[in-house]
Image: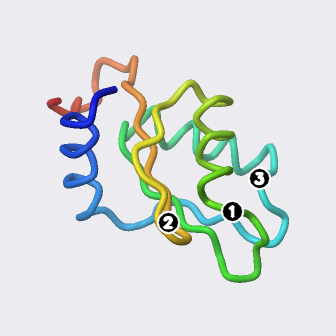
Amino acid sequence: MDSKIRAKLRAKASLLDPVCQIGLDGLTDNVVKTIDNVLENRELIKIKILQNSDCDAKILINTLAERLHAEPVQAIGRVMVLYRYSKKKNVKHIEI
C-alpha cells in the first residue's frame, strides 16, 4: 500500500468511531475473531486500546495485520486503524 492510498484511508478513518476495544487481557482469540468479522463487514475499522492495557499500538497493529491478512493504516497513541478488502458481495467497498 503506498502513501497516497494510506492517506485516503486515514482521512476516511478520521470520521469513524472505534468499533472494538482491547483491554487488560490484551489480544485474545475472541478479540481477534471480533475484529475479523467487523473487518469483513466494514473493510476499514478503528480500534482503541484501553488505558488499563499494557499493549503498545504500534506492535499490536502489526500483529493484528499479520494474523488477519489486513493492512495497517495508522497507529497513533492508543488508537489503531486497519483495512482489509472484503470478499463479501453485499458490502459497500471503499473506493481507493
Q: In x, y percent, where is residue 70?
A: 50, 30
Q: Residue at left 23%, top 29%? A: 93
The label number, if any, that marks residue 79 in the structure image:
2
**Contact, CB < 8 Å: mark 1 with mark 3?**
no
- Circle 1 sits on which residue? 56
Q: Which label lies toward us, 2 or 1?
A: 1
Secondary element at tag 1: loop
* Circle 2 Cα neighbour tier, 10 Å, few/some/many (<14 / 14–19 / ≥20): some
Is the N terminus in the top left, top right, bottom left or bottom right quadrant?
Answer: top left
Residue closer to the observer: 59 or 37? 59
Q: In x, y percent, where is residue 42?
A: 36, 41
Q: Amino acid at mark 2?
A: Val
Left or right: residue 65 versus residue 87 is right
Q: Amino acid at mark 3?
A: Leu
Q: Is residue 1 above or below residue 63?
A: above
Q: Residue at left 21%, top 52%? A: 12
Mark 1 or 3, nearer chain start = 3
